[in-house]
Image (cartoon, helix red, strand yellow):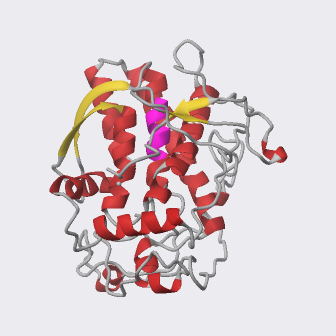
Amino acid sequence: MNDGAFRDVAYTPGVGAGKWRPHPNPVPANPPIANPDLARGYLPSATPGWGEVTPFTLLSAAQFWLPGPPALTGEAYARDYNELKSVGGKVSTVRTDEQTQIARFWFEGPGAWNTIARTVATTRRLDVTDSARALALMNLAMADAFIAGFKIRYVYDSWRPVTAIREGDNDGNDATVGDPTWDSHQNTPAVSDYPSTQSAFSGAAAVVLAGVLGSDEADFTFTSGEPFEGISRSFKSFSQASRESADSRVYAGIHSAARARTGSAWVGASDGGRARSTCSPSRSDRGPAGPHPQQSVAPPTRTVSAAAGKDESLDIREPAEPHLRAGVPDGRRLPALLPTTGRPTARTSS
């Protein structure tokens, strides 16, 4: 069976404000890249056909869709633009030492979640069968989050922050001021901006681990791998780790908050819930009910709100569009993997 992983898909970069085109890396590249041509950046778009790959557990790559990113001329776009411009630049007077460490810590990508899963499995003394099942479900969900994320990102095809900020005087928004010399803190992957697949696969991994292990709450410490190996951080829950993973992309200067937070959490949580409910052999150990294996849960097109306190959640209401209503129980609640308010404490993967 051909899953489409090696399918050639034609792609032409867009033109004009808001559209992705090849972009530079910071000088020097961060992390370092030995090949000077690759270090420079301006690479062609990577894997534009990955959204056409056959998913493992999703009915299709488009099963959990997202509304588009904020309009360039709106207040939300200006707020995210200015926030990222100040905290995510190569030179930043507001990014803290801890935020810089967070950006480095999570650069590793999905491998970090395998370290988390192995760490918690060892701490809880899971046997080989249960450990293998947790890792398998989590990786299926993360793989599908990548596929879904790439399907969505090549529809909206949004420019990356380095392009947006260098061309900020041409975006039609009086509240954004361009800086043609601005560089991101870390290298920007050669793919369009929205959504952040780092956030999506982190959301999926967190939901699966919480479901398989029976609770989101878990005390764990783990240490980062290459290329910024040796940084250790501690967490009290899988969702806390997922939120920080999303925030890291803002501190790195490669995703705005709108790209890295709520929308990507929707895809990840939905994908993770489906992987858990589709592949789990029994109901007793799945944790809170996720989407039914045959339901297509539509994106939150009317309201997305955060409940106060420890049980913060996404409140998913029935979408406005009639064709999206099928299979969406009114008031379905999914874990809030990323905050919807306040300052963000935020590879081809990203």
Q: Nearer the viewer, residue 164 or 20?
A: 164
- Inspect this view and state whether residue 156 appears: yes
Residue at the (50%, 40%) spot, across then down: 204
Considering depth in this image, is 35 or 265 the residue closer to the camera?
Answer: 265
Of residues 142 and 257, the one nearer the viewer is 257
Above or below residue 210? Residue 175 is below
Q: Position of residue 133 (x, y in %)?
A: 47, 27
* Residue 67 x, y percent position in the rendering: 65, 55
- Asked where in the image residue 17 lies, by quadrant, the reply is bottom right
Q: Quadrant of the C terminus?
A: bottom left
Give coordinates of residue 107: x percent, y percent: 31, 57
- Relative height, residue 234 to residue 44 (above, below): above
Which of these two is toward me, 124 or 96? 96
Image point 55% across, 50% down: which residue?
263
Q: Position of residue 151 (x, y in %)?
A: 63, 59
Left or right of residue 312: residue 235: left
Q: Report the predominant secondary structure element of the magenta stretch.
A: helix
Q: Is residue 73 magenta?
A: no
Answer with left or right where residue 123 lies relative to residue 329. left
In the picture as drawn, the residue positioned furthest to the top comes out as: 284
Residue 186, visible in the rendered structure: no
Q: Which residues are magenta?
A: 201-208
* Residue at (34% x, 86% y) in the render: 37
Relative to 138, is 35 above or below? below
The residue positioned 63% from the left and 60% from the top of the image is: 68
